[in-house]
Image (cartoon, helix red, strand yellow):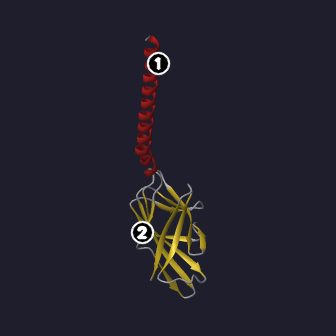
Amino acid sequence: MKARHAISTALATILIVAVVLVISVAAAYYVISVVAPVYEKGAETLMIKGDSYITKNNSSYIAKIHMYSDIKPALVVYAVKIGPKYIKLNTSSATIISYSGGKAELTNKGLVLSPGADVWVELQLAGDLSIGNFIEIKAYTEIGYVYNSVLVFK
């Protein structure tokens, strides 16, 4: 009878270990699914606001882009792509019209936005864009994110 008792003890031990492993994997998965999004939301956030627009002036286009950033310590937008045109942002290619809530500055690295910066940037684009009512815009950040939006044609 001792042999049966030893087999059932081993079987019970295996079952208990299996249940503990399943519960620990489930708990680890739950913790990762709850904690990971918190850290992902801490990544840089840039908003190209919906009141951004583009107009035509004689033979060139003027894009007025309204951006908001709440990244700490700062966010650097080094380039934008408006339709097919790729423009590196610096003091010679862009102008800051106004900003509030934080600090916005054009440098050789690009447009530097401090937390809470709400900024209007103006770009002059030569040539033809062949646009309808709107055109796609992409903003490229130093850390590697690409933010998409549209500019309405006015």
Where residue 89 appears, as percent x and y from the top left, is: 57, 66
In the image, what residue occupies the spot 47% across and 51% down? 73
In the image, what residue occupies the spot 53% across and 74% down? 123
User: 128 or 9, which is in the foreground?
Assistant: 9
Q: Quadrant of the N terminus?
A: top left
Which secondary structure lies at badge 1? helix
Which secondary structure lies at badge 2? loop
To which residue does mark 2 refer? Answer: 49
Of all residues, the one furthest to the top in this rendering is 2
Residue 7 got which mark?
1
User: 51 or 1, which is in the foreground?
Assistant: 1
**Up-down: is 133 above or below 121?**
below
User: 68 or 40, which is in the foreground?
Assistant: 40
Of all residues, the one furthest to the left in this rendering is 101
Q: Quadrant of the C terminus?
A: bottom left
Of all residues, the one furthest to the front in this rendering is 1
Residue 108 got which mark?
none
Which picture quadrant has residue 82? bottom right
Where residue 119 appears, as percent x and y from the top left, is: 44, 66
- Marks 1 and 2, how far apart at CA: 69 Å
| Label 2: how many Cα within 10 Å (few below 14, some 14–19, many 20+) | some
Where residue 5 appears, as percent x and y from the top left, is: 43, 15
Kind of residue at disc 2:
Lys
